[in-house]
Image: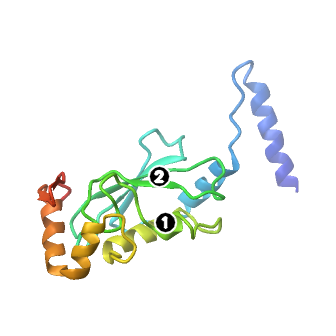
Amino acid sequence: MIKLFSVKQKQKEAAESANGRAPVKKQSAGELRVQKDISELNLAKTTSISFPNGKDNLLNFEITIRPDEGYYQGGTFVFSFQISQVYPHEAPKVKCKTKVYHPNIDLEGNVCLNILREDWNPVLSVNSILYGLQYLFLDPNPDDPLNHEAAEVLRDNPRQFDINVKRSMAGGYVAGNHFPRCI
């Protein structure tokens, strides 16, 4: 209890010493939880985080994944995270900024990951989502697709799927769609 009161006292003193300047912005519960999640992130050597709007804006950040095995080995995929003030009671909005030929990511960057939809619950964290995204690159799921064409090729002809993934990552065309180079 004493620590709680000392924190409140310090906040009050900081506000008084601002001498007419704007008071220090109070963090929302969502911002506090994101701060905790980010400090506890377990980033593999193939993953990095950046804050394009500055480190003060914790509710918007990017995660870059560079798979070192599987179909997508050698690629670089950037995901934007937008987190609401009511996080963790609402799942983050995650989009893939890198156009990718993938059964669980559509051409607009929407991601099909169950924990971002119906299976979200407040005990999950940014780290949980990160593991889910990494797993999508290791083992794409053709049974729950957003890109139905890619899912069908993966299901019916895995060798052709591998060729299509390599072509798309090299900056080629697959099924009439151009993919920017990401390797």
What is the quadrant of residue 101 in the picture?
bottom left
- Amino acid under label 2? Phe
Kindly indicate whether the residue at mark 1 contacts the one at mark 2 (C-beta within 8 angstroms): yes
Q: How many numbered marks are there?
A: 2
Q: Residue at x 57, y 64 (%)?
A: 125
The circle drawn on residue 5 is none
Q: Position of residue 23 (x, y in %)?
A: 72, 28
Q: Earlier in the sequence, mark 2 or mark 1?
A: 2
Q: Position of residue 35 (x, y in %)?
A: 59, 53
Kindly report the distance in space between the C-alpha atoms of the residues bearing marks 2 and 1: 10 Å
Residue beneath disc 1: 129
What is the quadrant of residue 122 in the picture?
bottom right
Element assignment for label 2:
strand
Q: Residue at x 42, y 65 (%)?
A: 112
Answer left or right for 76 relative to 104.
left
Q: Nearer the viewer, residue 9 or 180?
A: 180
Q: Nearer the viewer, residue 122 or 149?
A: 149
- Amino acid under label 1? Ile
Q: Residue at x 18, y 80 (%)?
A: 157
Label 2 neighbourhood size at 10 Å, few (<14), some (14-19), many (20+)?
some
